[in-house]
Image (cartoon, rainbow, N blue to C red):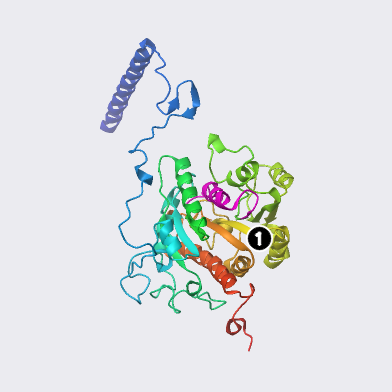
Amino acid sequence: MIMKKSLTALAIAASMGLMAADADAQMLKDIAEAGPNENIGPMPHEVPGDPSKMNIKQDKSTDIWRAEREPSGRAAGPMEVQRYQLQMENVGINTFYKLPVALTPEDLAAGEIDIAIFGAPTGALPGSHGSVWAPAEVRSTRDYGGYGDPKFPLSWIEYETLIAPFTILNAVDYGDAGMNAYNQAQTLEEIRRMTREVASIGAVPFVVGGDHSVPNGTFRGIVDVYGKKNVAFVHFDAHLDRDQNMGKFGTYYHSGTFMDRAFNEGMVEGRHIVQYGMATPVFGEDEYDAVAAQGGKVYHHHEIRRDGVEAIFDKIYEDLADIDLVYVSFDIDTFDMSYAPGTGSSSPIGARPEDLFPMLREFAATKTIVGVDFVEYNPFFDNAGKQTARLMRRTMFQFLTGIAMRKAGMEPDFVHPRVSGEP
């Protein structure tokens, strides 16, 4: 009986609470209805009269993110920043492959640099926000190698060739491109500037992204130097990354615009755009029809699995038979998600490193690589062992080894006899 009364009391209290809430709601409705209901004008970022344009203030305070510091007065050239001649990789200052650092074009020229690796920390897509941390993670992740000076023969050695590419190539860590966290377009323009800066002295920019909007800046920087329609674009990815409408939800630069924008602006011939590894659905077969109409080639995971990786690369060599200069854009989700969990758009169907690595190395030893980006690594999605960061760095290393082989005049398909099993 007491319990029943208690429940009744609670019900009455709850009812009174609901009545009070209804009264509050009605009061707000009455206030809103009596309000002036005026339109106070456009949002501050909009240009009055044209909401499609942004009103962006430009002064010293807004540009501080890309204002470079004054030179320190040192002589031009790469700087060795490690204290010891021989050290494990977890000791010392983190740079890509423990390489020396360069900060200016004068440093690159004085060091006769072949390869300048720099970060492009962008995260413009919903699954890619953590990608701004990718360059830092790739620099610091544990891996085999890094025993002191990169030119020391026991430092970084590629497994199948037994080549230490940094004994052949002059390479540096060129830092990171400036990032405007609130304006993706300006960040891409800075990435373009740094790419152009590296390419202008004849070095190869190795760009560590960042999400796959990065080539909107890097490829444009390459074309600035080498000219329109003089460079092929080879794209490794599980996704087609084509957006004929040139903008998702009204955005101008994202992971689906870089190839179509380059084609539409005359930066590259359609027949010189080659795509490898597609393993995810698109929004209709007309997307493939549009690529074919441009003259582009798409090699899907289905046909790669059916015909074999080597056979597909033979077709790619045929596709690019009339052009030697090549820019490569490599999305880490090209690999099956069991190998690369640390990416925002992973695919349960994809490439295996043991199949693709030899072909990437041979490709870099065959064609003249003028720029490479490695994108879509997201450390927040990686596992505790930093599996994807290690895979990212090993993928970069295949290209570095191939470029070193080309510089040394070696056969592109070389494998060391002791590794291949030959006597």
In this image, 221 relative to 97: left or right? right
Q: Mark 1 = which residue?
A: 324
In this image, 37 relative to 300: left or right? left
Q: Position of residue 281 (x, y in %)?
A: 64, 48
The image shows residue 193, relative to residue 152, as above or below, that is above
In this image, 42 relative to 306: left or right? left
Magenta includes 166? no
Residue nearest the viewer, comparing 401 with 297: 401
Quarter occupied by the C terminus: bottom right
Residue 58, located in which quarter of the rendered image?
top left
Q: Which residues are magenta?
A: 210-234
Q: Position of residue 135 (x, y in %)?
A: 43, 57
The image shows residue 145, relative to residue 173, as above or below, that is below
Residue nearest the viewer, comparing 6 with 35: 35
Residue nearest the viewer, comparing 406 with 298: 406
Q: Position of residue 74 (x, y in %)?
A: 32, 61
Quarter occupied by the N terminus: top left
Give amino acid for label 1.
Asp
Q: Please report the residue visible at 35 percent of the width from the left and 68 percent of the height from the top.
A: 80
Magenta includes 221? yes
Q: Please report the residue visible at 44 percent of the width from the left and 61 percent of the height from the top.
A: 108
Q: Position of residue 401 (x, y in %)?
A: 54, 70
